[in-house]
Image (tube, rainbow, N blue to C red):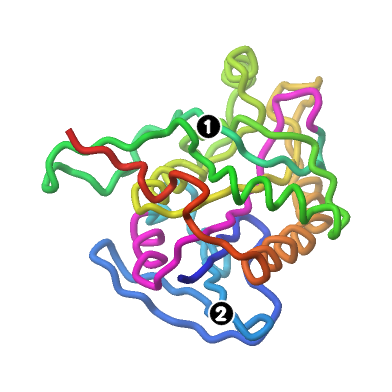
Amino acid sequence: MRKAIIGGTGVYDLAGKCKQEMVQTSYGDVMVDIVSYKGQEIVFLARHGKEHSVPPHLINYRANMKALQHLGVTHVYATCAVGSCNQDYAPGDVVVMRDFMDFTKSRPVTFYEGDEGVLHTDMSEPYCHVLVEKFYQKSVEHNIKIKGKAVYVCTEGPRFETAAEIDFYHRNKGDVVGMTNVPEVVLAKELGMCYAAIGIITNYCTGFNNTEEIGLDEIYAALSDNKEKITSCALEILIDEKLNQDECQCAHAVLGL
């Protein structure tokens, strides 16, 4: 059993002794870091690449998640930079995802293309409740104030959303908006992994809260303040907690007809 952290925007590595490994999958090759931390190995994958060179709509999500499976990963914490369309969530806040809405358009979103028969994946609990609750408990020790659980709206990117789109998401109970969590969370569920996503609010969404434009300085400032605390908290859970898959249904989400 191995554990992993997927780093989103602004999170490109982990502290500790590490070696790089190229993992070959049927969907493409993936470079990961194998980080030695407190005598254990954690797999780290930079979602956009180490240089943040891959835009969200071109990320090879299936190769990334297959690479983690090939490495024996069963538990994953993912970080993501998100905009807020909820008045209660301000730039700099940290939220934990509880559900998602998918507005992507052109991405491969499944491993199951019919060769295995007709399979469906249960999405009644997209994010592992065990990993979520452990993050809540451990966050106190790392001085992380979690503002709440959020519904993640995933858009195609790489453009930001229009004010009309954000108004629509807000009216339909979306809390935060990003471009990467789908299909990542879906593919993790298809592979039987426990997966949780932690969001850093970097800005208000277009036209929300009387904002006129999104500034990159604001985004990177919010990331800088939170990324180390979040990754340290996730690392300690993955290393120290006795994790198994007996307390959740993540490993049994795929249903055949």
Q: Position of residue 196 (x, y in %)?
A: 57, 49
Left or right position of 200 against 90: left
- 228 to 245, vertically: above or below: below
* Residue at 63% across, 55% down: 9
Quadrant assignment, res 148: top right
Quadrant assignment, res 85: top right
Q: Position of residue 53 (x, y in %)?
A: 52, 62
Residue 16 drawn in magenta: no
State the SS at label 2: strand
Q: Residues within 10 Å of mark 1 (few under 14, many from 20)?
A: many
Left or right position of 246 against 233: left
Q: Which residue bears the numbered disc 2?
A: 41
Q: Which residue bears the numbered disc 1?
A: 100
Q: Nearer the viewer, residue 251 or 148?
A: 251
Q: Residue furthest front?
A: 246
* Residue at 44% across, 82% down: 21
Q: Residue furthest right?
A: 143
Residue 85 drawn in magenta: yes
Q: Identify the amino acid type marked 2.
A: Glu
Left or right position of 191 against 221: left
